[in-house]
Image: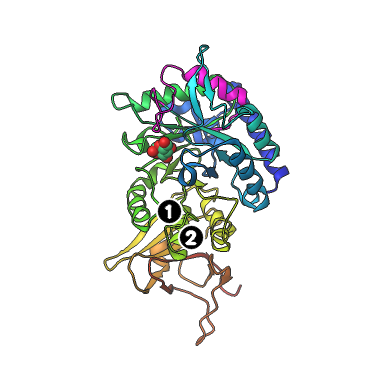
Amino acid sequence: MTTASIKRTVVVAFVAALFAACGPGSGRKDAAAVEPSARSEAPAAAILAPVPPMGFNTWNKFGCDVDETLIRQTADAMVETGMLDAGYRYLVIDDCWQVERGADGRIVADPKKFAGGMKALADYVHSKGLLFGLYTDIGPKTCAGRPASAGFFDIDAATYAEWGVDYIKVDWCNCDDLDAPAEYARFRDALRRTGRPIVLSICEWGRNDPWKWAKGVGQLWRTTADIGDSWESVVWIVGANSRHAAAAGPGGWNDPDMLEVGNGGMTFDEYKTHFSLWAIMAAPLMAGNDLRAMTDETRAILLNKEVIEVDQDPLGVQGDVVIERGYGGQVWMKPLADGSKAVAFVNYTGRELAQYVRWAQIGLPPGPARVRDLWAHRDMEPHADTGKRYDERFEVKVPAHGVVLVRIWPVSAGS
Ligand code: GLA
């Protein structure tokens, strides 16, 4: 997507959200699919995140070490590296931007690290064609102990709207005795009262079964504890997030946490598996590495448009495991809007593993199919011995901790 078209999309979304909020009978078809209590919020939610949000978040790489220079340089990098064109639109500052609450009740950004103020920073981010995000917490303090939003939902929402915030991640530290569905709904209502469409990223780590209530409240909800930059962490999160596939869809997404691709703790193959599974699971794709200094391998992963297309497919189905092999292999399938299937062969073992799938196991009709390798960026050759296309099954060798991700289109005979 070009910068100009993103700007256009933002304007259209903004106008559409206002109309959805005010116009009688303006609900979209999706509204019928959500809980009655959430119905009035559904049109705006669907417009804000018809596909999983994509962007960058400071936490995984920078933790509390955030300032306006980092944000400006990251905004520049998102444009220069092609991240924005690939769909990464939200630039989100996580914890530690805030230092106190002023006498007027307004949250105060660190005056040393954000000397120019948040409004000017948001303006800069917007001038690049990007969208701007911040972080807070439902409780009195954030997870890093900074002042948070308890008792100040309306004043904080109004402040974000004034600054030009487009996305707010709302954490759950220091909230143990609170009612999560009620608190996040109150936060959503405060955002709504500002009249500005702001994505609400719910971050209560799956503690209160958000897959049961978060659609219509926020546009994405964490399903697990924090990711780490390790293969073990990815494997564990994938298992937990996959249990809630049925809850995801246009307007609301399970969030298995931000990406670790490029942070150094995993091999190239492991990062490819991490990214492929996030795409198959229709997960939000929030890069968490230093975008100013990416290796070619990191770029090849984060900027793989064919994999991103799987994640962003408008059908909005969270893919799931279709074959569980007892010896450490899995086959995942995500149906796509054009009738094709994305299929990931995952190898959890430490040695190469041969795997196969039959068309019947992934809902394809019998007959010839086109099979495209989304990491090699090429169609798989017809069988050498017969010259025939794949017509009933597909078999592949998967490297240790690796993935083979293909897209399979049925083709009519003779084509
Ligand atoms: C929690 C969240 C993380 C991050 C930190 C910030 O742990 O789950 O994603 O936002 O807080 O303190």
Tell me where residue 330 appears, x and y as whole percent.
Answer: 35, 63
Q: Amino acid at mark 1?
A: Gly
Q: Secondary structure at mark 1?
A: loop
Asked if the beta carbon under badge 2 is closer than 8 A to the nearest atom of ligand 1, the reply is no
Decide whether residue 159 is among the magenta residues.
yes
Distance between the alpha carbons at the discs numbered 2 and 1: 8 Å
Q: Amino acid at mark 2?
A: Ala
Q: Secondary structure at mark 2?
A: strand
Q: Residues within 10 Å of mark 2 (few under 14, many from 20)?
A: many
Residue closer to the observer: 317 or 309: 309
Residue closer to the observer: 198 or 93: 93
Q: Is residue 110 above or below residue 290?
A: above
Check if mark 2's residue and mark 1's residue have beta carbons within 8 Å: yes
Q: Main secondary structure of the magenta part?
A: loop
- Image-quadrant location for residue 300: bottom right
Q: Which residue is mark 1?
A: 319
Q: Residues within 10 Å of mark 1 (few under 14, many from 20)?
A: many
6 with respect to 136 (left or right): right
Residue 176 visible to an observer of this rendering: yes
Q: Which residue is mark 2?
A: 342
Q: Which residues are magenta?
A: 138-167
Which residue is pictured at 61% across the width and 72% down the height?
415
Tell me where residue 409 appears, x and y as whole percent.
Answer: 53, 65
Q: What numbered label is drawn on residue 306?
A: none
Task: Indicate the quadrant of ligand 1 in the picture.
Answer: top left
Residue closer to the observer: 336 or 105: 105
